[in-house]
Amino acid sequence: MKDIIPRDLWEYKTADYFYQLKNLFRKSGNYNQLYLAIRNLGVCLPINTGRAALVVALKALKLLPGSNIGVPLFCCPVVFEAIEKAGGKPVFIDCEKDNFCLSVSDLEKKIKSLDCLIVVHMFGNPAEMNDILKIAGRIPVIEDCAQALGTKYRSKTVGKLGSISIFSFRSGKYISAGEGGAIFSADKAIFESSSKIIQRLPIPGRISEFKHMSKVALKSFLRQRPLYGIIGRRIWSAVSNYDSISRRRSIYLSRIYKSDLFLIKKRLEYFEIILQRQRKIASIYLKELNISEEMMSREKPGTFCNRIYFPITFPSRSLRDKMAELLLRNNIDSMKYLDGLVPVARKYFGYKDDCPVSESLSERVLNIPCFYDMSEAEVGRIIDTFNKNWKQISA
Ligand SMILES: Cc1ncc(COP(=O)(O)O)c(C=O)c1O
């Protein structure tokens, strides 16, 4: 039996399943009055997924069909899919190599062609919002905070800085609740417009809700120890590649499953505690990993990163892949987060090879496990294994 440290945290437990089951039969009032409060942000509109939230956010801005939506190439392709689902066209913008977020200079070059901009706070790092908002001027800015719950930019919580923002609570992210998304806007008209769109979406019935919960539970158990090492990892590698995901065009919009919403609310209660623990693990990595400064992802001055992931930028693809292989040989999984991104963007979303930094990063970044419930011994084992192998392969 292989006890592999998983690449990310799927926190769903048997108790969560029973908690959801109990809530399935709970009367919780009118669907139109379901809200979600996020600390330091405010009242948000819940929806079934983060990608659905993006589609609604784009629609709420009432853009013309075929509008050009600026989006960083270095992000999950479901974002490109959401743009197309909302009737827009992605215009790809490069990213900065030190924070993995939108490149200010490339945005400056492309701004004239844009009708709207999506800013992704990638890996929990906040994008350079002051510069970006200045360049964006009057065009609406959507903040994609799917990976950035709790992140701050110049003491301000991200999600509040643009016209509208979205969040994701899918497992593997901070609030590992199976699925779920949310929308926030401080602009009353945009908030109302989003709310109206959501109110027209289908409400999941009890049977569909029960099936959804059971699917989430099954997937989550496969992604956790002990099943992850025995069989889950192999199943995951076989079914999850971007190419097949993009061919499926899988964005479905519905109201949030109530069982997900209750679990998200419960998890949000102790979010601050897990955030601090996870940041502590990241700070140990920053201190103990024997790698060069260019490989390390440090917080830029004036920013607060939630450390949802711990990305390391290798000098080459072959060194990254070698390290991933050696970690796995020592029962430590890792994530080549956007490997395979570029061909998918080219093939399905009209990417024209004008984002060299993002292309290079997609081949060189590896995220090592960084989640709050790892033990000190596990963190130590990852550091020792990494340092020992890096010394050898970088020589
Ligand atoms: C940056 C980013 N935006 C949007 C999404 C979509 O969120 P969800 O998976 O909840 O649909 C994800 C996650 O997959 C993401 O990483």
Image: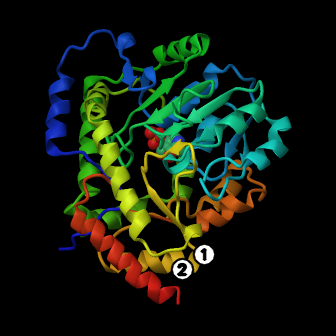
Q: Is residue 328 visible?
A: no
Vertically, is 171 above or below 257? below
* Residue 21 shown left or right of residue 53 in the figure: left
Residue 119's spot in the image, x, y percent? 63, 39
Residue bearing mark 1: 315
**Which residue: 23% across, 53% down?**
221
Vertically, is 292 above or below 297? below
Residue bearing mark 2: 319
* Residue 68 shown left or right of residue 339 in the figure: right
Q: Amino acid at mark 2?
A: Leu
Look at the numbered discs 2 and 1 and tell me whether their residues touch, using CB distance below 8 Å.
yes
SS of the residue under disc 2: helix
**Which residue: 29% across, 66% down?**
379
> Split into 4 quadrants, where in the image is the N terminus?
bottom left
Vertically, is 146 above or below 391? above
* Residue 239 shown left or right of residue 319 in the figure: left
Q: Based on the displayed image, in which of its 4 quarters is residue 3 positioned?
A: bottom left
Q: Is residue 50 visible?
A: yes
**Which residue: 45% across, 78% down?**
323
Question: How many C-alpha atoms fall within 10 Å of the one at disc 2: few (<14), some, or many (≥20)?
Answer: some
Q: Based on the displayed image, in which of its 4 quarters is residue 129 positioned?
A: top right
Q: Amino acid at mark 1?
A: Pro
